[in-house]
Amino acid sequence: MTTHLEQALRFHRQKYPLRETADDIKLLYQHTLGAEHLVQAGNAKVYLERELSERELSPSLSTQPFVYRLPIEAEPIGNDRFRFPLAEMMRLGLSPELSARLFAAGSGLRSSDKTQDDLREALQVLPDTDYLRRYIGCGCPPVHHSDTYRAAYRPAYRVMEGLLLRALPFIQRIWNHLEALSASEASRPLLVAVDGECGSGKSLLSAALSCIFEAPVIHTDDFYLPMPLRTPEKMREPGWNLDLPRFLEQVAEPLRSGKPCYYAVYDAHHDALTYSRRLPDALVYIVEGTFALRPELAGYYAHSLYITVPHDLQKDRILSRNGERIYADFEARWNPDFERYSKAFDVEKSAEFTLCNDSSSFLLSAAATPADI
């Protein structure tokens, strides 16, 4: 059992002394597998609005400008997941539409990380009871809160990924921007950059943003500089890894001018440009990856985020994802290149928002004050 799970169980046992075995099982299910099921944003909105009405939680605040207030009142369930109360969504002024999209995006974000076997292992922390044995014998399906728990505490929440809660001000800034666009302005899409340290969660967050905003993701890895162009002079430049002229010509300029966008995808295994990708029409495009925040691109972005991660956690993630050999290569070659780029352009300070994705921190800094978000 992880330390975070121990802390979460202790928290809920103290706050909800009338809980029953079914409620502990529900917490362990959500801790391990996340939301009880994958959802579509449209259905999520319908259910959310119905529950808000039943709970007499008025969404009237959602018509006012969003004001981000720390701390967010969300209950930890371990594994960097939280129960996000509907009342807190209303306090923050989140619209039902955005809240539903956040929930839908989070429900599938790490859906393949854990399995029923992981859940069965987590359930071993509970006392061995007839109820628990019957539950495991039924294949560990999703379970409701007990009648006692519902009568005493009237639970009304959604399970949210910690990464999305930490990125909430950034997400809401984009949402506000879209809502403020006039019909003529909407003809030009918003280009949004997500840069940051290796293993910080750039790809994971970009996948969520893609779901929330129905936004295609453009990976900077597709614009890696081919070997013939890596001259000694070029490789002395900070951020040389990005084929900047090609990115400007094939992505940045066409999108800014509202023209169709086609670009060739770089294949690292063959050091060659392979198939051509045609970006679908959209209101938002996400540029994800290292070197996305080169200063030459600043004028093209409507919004930008830089993600950091503690070194120990970064090492654990890279080792888990790529293994020892790739991590050694990362330390010897890629990380020095990235640090040179980051320091040369002061990338962290140049971003609109900076986020530390260490599963215990919220937003580190923003160019705007919270009231402006």
Image (tube, rainbow, N blue to C red):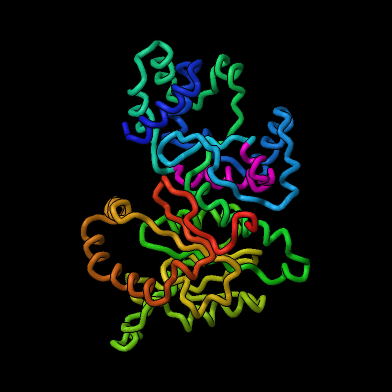
Q: Quadrant of residue 214?
A: bottom right
In this rendered view, identify the residue nearer to me: 216 or 155: 155
Percent x, y of residue 73: 55, 38
Against 232, residue 3 (above or below) is above
Percent x, y of residue 234: 34, 86
In this rendered view, identify the residue nearer to me: 166 or 300: 166
Q: How many marks?
A: 0
In this rendered view, identify the residue nearer to me: 220 or 162: 162
Q: Visible in this render: residue 217?
A: no
Q: Visible in this render: residue 330?
A: yes
Q: Residue furthest top?
A: 130
* Secondary structure predominantly adopted by residues drawn in magenta: helix
Against 159, residue 293 (above or below) is below
Against 154, residue 288 (above or below) is below
**Residue under the point 46% across and 26% down:** 12
Position of residue 114 in the picture relative to residue 164 (left or right): left
Residue range of the region highlighted in magenta in the rendering: 88-111
Q: Say if the magenta span includes residue 113.
A: no
**Residue under the point 66% across and 46% down:** 94
**Residue under the point 37% across and 24% down:** 123
Position of residue 120 in the picture relative to residue 37 (left or right): left
Q: Quadrant of residue 188?
A: bottom right
| Quadrant, the C terminus | bottom right
